[in-house]
Amino acid sequence: MTSESDNSSQRAKAGNGRVASFLLADHRYVFLGTSVVALLGMLLSSQPRSSMSFLAHAYAVEVLMYYFLAAWVVLSLVALVNKLARWRDYAVVSPFVRPGFRKVERILSYFVWAFAIVLFVDRGVMGLFAITSSAIASNSNPKDSLSSAIYMLYEGRQIFATGIATTIELAVFGTLIAFFLALLLVFLRIQRIDRPDNDLVRFLKVIGSGFAKVYSAVVRGTPMMVQAGIIYFAGFGMFKGSGMSVTQVNGIWSTFIAGLVTISLNSTAYMMEVLRGGIESVDKGQAEAARSLGLSQWQAMTKVVFPQGIKYSIPGLSNELVINIKDSSVLSVIGVFDLMFATTTVAGIYYRQTETYMVAAVFYLILTMVASKLLSMFAKRLDVKSGPVMGTSDTTIPSAEAEH
Amino acid sequence: MKSANEEHASTSEPVIKVEGLRKSFGSHVVLKDIDFTVMPGEVVTIIGASGSGKSTLLRCINLLEIPDAGHVWFHGKDLAAQHVDVNKLREKIGMVFQGFNLFNNMNVLDNCTLAPVTLKKMDKAEAESVAMGHLRSVGLEEFAKADVNTLSGGQKQRVAIARALCMRPDLMLFDEPTSALDPEIVGEVLGVMRDLAKDGMTMVVVTHEMDFAKNVSDKVVFMDQGVIAEEGSPKQMFTSPKHPRTREFLSRYLEDTKEK
């Protein structure tokens, strides 16, 4: 008897995870878990019906379902009282643990789930449809938040679509450009003086790695919002200074271009640090072995260290895309028409800030979740161990312990 | 081994000549005025306690550590001089590390062919046939296409030896090649090294394997606190060491042999 329940709980655990096994397979909690589901179903049933409710046409069915759920809750309470009264020998003497009863209980619990789901669809999903269709059909902004959000989303759909497209373009192209720039910069950053180098090479190496260090410090030490302002207005001034009219300058140096330049240059610094972390975590012995065979520092880097270091960096690099989706929002300060700018535009039209920002939050969340899902699939294909994690811009990849 | 020895002996110029070598890390002096020569075909073992400077001396020979003062002549060229093409000279000095240091992004064969293909402009097919020959001699022919991460420690170290041999070095440096291996596997690596010595390869071996030092080497160097305390033939070192530190260091070993 117990072994049967153990087996089924293990099976469920392997299949659907802990929550499912907790609610369905583990006898001790079948009543507890499903009675919560039943109570939720009853609560939904007590909600007002929307115009699209299909149960409105089958009132008797809903009454039956309601009483079935109520009966289940009562049965659970009886079982609970029984358990509290006989807590020492419940598992042996209680009628609720007899094999026949258990089977019935399990089958009934499936009905509880089914009824709760039917009620959820009727009240929740159909209700949302009803709200959506009435909000869309409405001529003025509805009072309640959900309807209002849907109304503004529908009315401002073109604004939001433009904003989302711009945000995706900024994040994707910005990250790609930054990746290639970061590869160049990290190459400068890790230059070390080698014995056979002549004085010119030594000088260039010092300049190169110094430049990379300063670049990284300045870019990571200033807010992107400020960088965006500097880049946009400095660029504007430069083109203007070359004798162009304002219209001409706007044609070349649009806010989007300035925003793309900003996000690329900003992300370059962070990606360079991620790459550096990956490259430095490649065990130094391998570079030494390559040098001992007569390979130059450059050959050892390109043939042995870089391929491994870039692979180690992939989780951190893909994390940068997720960060850029979110951080591109600050570019709205120079007037880039991204999702954030779209949000403030819509909020300005309807004077409903909370609802519009909630809409923006949902969009950003969907974008970042889709991006990290795609990236982790990509990383899995490349056989990289850890997937991308949501983090802040300050996340750095800890380099593996150095040998010396 | 003897024949190879005599062949080289006619030129009688040392492969490696170290003179007045000094090296310190910060304020810690690791090597003090080391003088040391290796003749062609000679197998020199360096023994001594941990921290006595053995590995640093070895690493100074191919300039993985830059000496603070002194000279390292390899075939008469001073490696320690400024602007000497170290890369070119290193091609002729193979090195085997304690931690194997195989390239993890390549398979066994690519580990062996990387340097010959990159440096000698040997074409891939030729480099591969040379590499297969060396892999065969270390008994790992069938692992040529294996990922290095799937190999055991002993196999990794044998690949590392084959990789170094692919450059046809004049001199092989071994930096505690068996210290990271468990006792059962040590034998397979020492076997390969013994074969190499028999073929007349000039070798400098830093090791804690006293049997190897005693039976395979032509010269044993005992280092203590950054200086060469004593050097001599294995017979002399293992039967009548003169320096008290040598006697102390080898005491357990000397007693063992007496019991036998």
Image: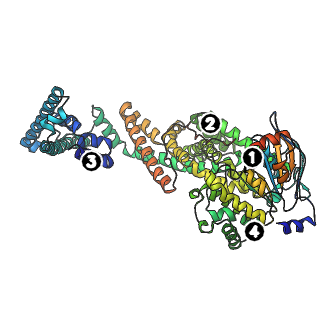
Residue found 14% across the figure and 34% down from its top: A93
| Residue beneath disc 1 | B253
Residue A220 is tagged as 2
Q: Position of residue A280 (x, y in %)?
A: 65, 45
| Residue beneath disc 3 | A7
Q: Are marks 4 and 3 in contact (CB under 8 Å)?
A: no
The amino acid pointed to by label 4 is: Lys
The Cα–Cα distance between marks 1 and 3, rounded to whole angstroms, is 61 Å
Q: Residues within 10 Å of mark 2 (few under 14, many from 20)?
A: some
Residue B121 is tagged as 4
B143 left or right of A189 in image: left
The Cα–Cα distance between marks 1 and 2, rounded to whole angstroms, is 60 Å
The amino acid pointed to by label 2 is: Arg
> Which circle, 4 or 3, is nearer the viewer?
3
Q: Earlier in the sequence, mark 2 or mark 3?
A: 3
Q: Position of residue A82 (x, y in %)?
A: 14, 29
Q: Residues within 10 Å of mark 4 (few under 14, many from 20)?
A: few
